[in-house]
Structures are given as structure tokens and as C-alpha cells.
């Protein structure tokens, strides 16, 4: 029994040493919420992909989801489960984390034709958002905003989304492709923004819906800023 324990101790020590060598002495093991960090197998975004434009996954194999997203029961309305395509008959594409990650990479690389949009209210954004995303709160571009102050909505379209106002006619030929998200499948904020954009003529092929939102992003322990 003592021999087995000695062998186990030596094996564990060698394994930890190997992990430390893999990540390097400068690796930050404190990227997460848990106090005690556990070295383990590398957590890639995809096979062989550890980091994209500053986005990575927490390397603590014992890390757990952010408590802000741990609740399973939220009052509906307003926190109702969103359908796959809440914009029918418009065919807005629903995208995954990988799509958003590579859109963020394109933005970071200087691609001005793409924008990652956090449609949540500022209070939620302060708790963390997706790197390289900008915040355009849904209540500034939803249907109520269109009725209350349509020119304010158009100002966002022209100043932020590269829509051109041609003497009252909106030209979307150079409009950005928007990747919109909010808190997840129980959040209706980004769908409300997308429906309003469709209502005002934004091309459906230039609108992408990340239904999983911050709930799924946090469950995968992806980088937040």
C-alpha cells in the first residue's frame, strides 16, 4: 500500500509539472471566480485553438458558472423562452459561440463590415460582456423607440450601423452585419431589437441572432470584459 501511495504521489507531481510547463510561468490561474484553482487538461475553444482575439476559456477545470446566470427559474413574462426563429417569416440566422468569436476576431482585426452588438441594458453590461462588442440597448431601437422617437433610431442606424439616410430613404447597401445577443434563451431584449430593425427595413441577411447569449457564453467560461 505504501508503495502504491508513493508511486501515486510521484505520478501526480510529474503531471502537475508537465501542466505548468505547458502553460508557462506567466500563466494566470486566477481567471475565474473560484478561490482554489486546479490545474488540468487544456480547455480549448476548438481543437487546437486556445485563443482568438483575446477570447479564451477559463483553464480551471473546476470552475463553475457565474452565479448571475445560475438561476433556472425566471418570471415569464418578461423572461420567456425564446423560439429558434422569433422573427418568422423573416429568416434571421441563429448563430453559435464560434460564429460570435470569429465575428469578434474580424472586428478586432479591423473589419468594418461586421459588428457584435450587446443589446442588453447598461446594468447588465457592467457585469461583463463579450470582448469587442459594443452596447446598443434594445430599448433605444425597439418598436416603442421607433414610435416615440424614430429619428433617434435612425441616428443610431446611420452613426453606428453604417446605414445611409438618402433624403429620408434609408440605404442599407453598406450596412454592417450585426451579431446581436442579450442574456440567453430566456431573454427577449435582442429579439426585440432585431424585430424593430426588420420593421424599419434592415436586411435579414445582415442580422445574426446569438440566442445563447451571455448565459451560454458564461457556461462555457469564455472571456468577458
Image: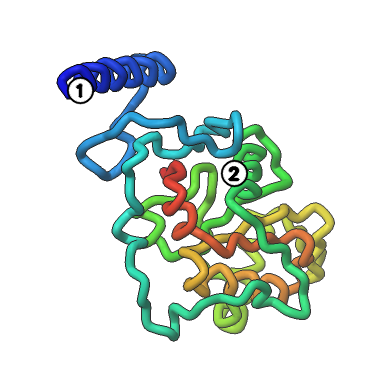
| Mark pair 1, 2: CA separation | 44 Å
Q: Which mark is residue 134?
A: none
Give the quadrant of residue 96: bottom right
Residue drawn at 73 percent across, 67 percent down: 92
Question: Would residue 139 be seen by someone viewing this image from the given angle?
Answer: no
Q: SS for tag 2? A: helix
Pick the residue in front: 75 or 120. 75
What x and y, as percent, mark residue 64? 33, 50
Residue drawn at 58 percent across, 50 percent down: 97
What x and y, as percent, mark residue 136? 53, 60
Q: Which mark is residue 101?
A: 2
Kindly indicate whether the residue at mark 2 contacts the one at mark 1 (C-beta within 8 angstroms). no
Does residue 81 lie above or below 183 as drawn?
A: below
Does residue 53 lie above or below 164 as drawn?
A: above
Q: Quadrant of the C terminus?
A: top left
Pick the residue in front: 65 or 130. 65
- Colour convention of the picture: rainbow
Q: SS for tag 1? A: helix
Return the residue found at the far left.
2
Precedes in sequence: disc 1 or disc 2:
1
Pick the residue in front: 84 or 204. 84
Q: Residues within 10 Å of mark 2 (few under 14, many from 20)?
A: many
Residue drawn at 37 percent across, 82 percent down: 75
What x and y, as percent, mark residue 173? 84, 57
Return the residue found at the far front.
1
**Which one is closest to the eye, mark 1 or mark 2?**
1
169 displayed left or right of 108? right
- The residue that disc 1 covers is 5
Amino acid at each position: 500500500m505504501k508503495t502504491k501511495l508513493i508511486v501515486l504521489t510521484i505520478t501526480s507531481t510529474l503531471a502537475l509539472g508537465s501542466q505548468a510547463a505547458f502553460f508557462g510561468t506567466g500563466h494566470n490561474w486566477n481567471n475565474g471566480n473560484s478561490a482554489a484553482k486546479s490545474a488540468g487538461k487544456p480547455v480549448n475553444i476548438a481543437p487546437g485553438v486556445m485563443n482568438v482575439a483575446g477570447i479564451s476559456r477559463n483553464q480551471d477545470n473546476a470552475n463553475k458558472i457565474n452565479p448571475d446566470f445560475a438561476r433556472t427559474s425566471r418570471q415569464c413574462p418578461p423572461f420567456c423562452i425564446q423560439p429558434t426563429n422569433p422573427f418568422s417569416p423573416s429568416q434571421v440566422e441563429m448563430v453559435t459561440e464560434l460564429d460570435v468569436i470569429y465575428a469578434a476576431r474580424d472586428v478586432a482585426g479591423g473589419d468594418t463590415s461586421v459588428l457584435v452588438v450587446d443589446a442588453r441594458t447598461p446594468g447588465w453590461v457592467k457585469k461583463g460582456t463579450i470582448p469587442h462588442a459594443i452596447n446598443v440597448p434594445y430599448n433605444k431601437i425597439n418598436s416603442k423607440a421607433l414610435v416615440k422617437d424614430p429619428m433617434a433610431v435612425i441616428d443610431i442606424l446611420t452613426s453606428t450601423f453604417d446605414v445611409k439616410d438618402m433624403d429620408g430613404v434609408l440605404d442599407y447597401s453598406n450596412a454592417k452585419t450585426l451579431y446581436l445577443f442579450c442574456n440567453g434563451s430566456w431573454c427577449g431584449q435582442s429579439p426585440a431589437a432585431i424585430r424593430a430593425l426588420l420593421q424599419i427595413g434592415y436586411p435579414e441577411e445582415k442580422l445574426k441572432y446569438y440566442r445563447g447569449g451571455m448565459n451560454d457564453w458564461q457556461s462555457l467560461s469564455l472571456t468577458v470584459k
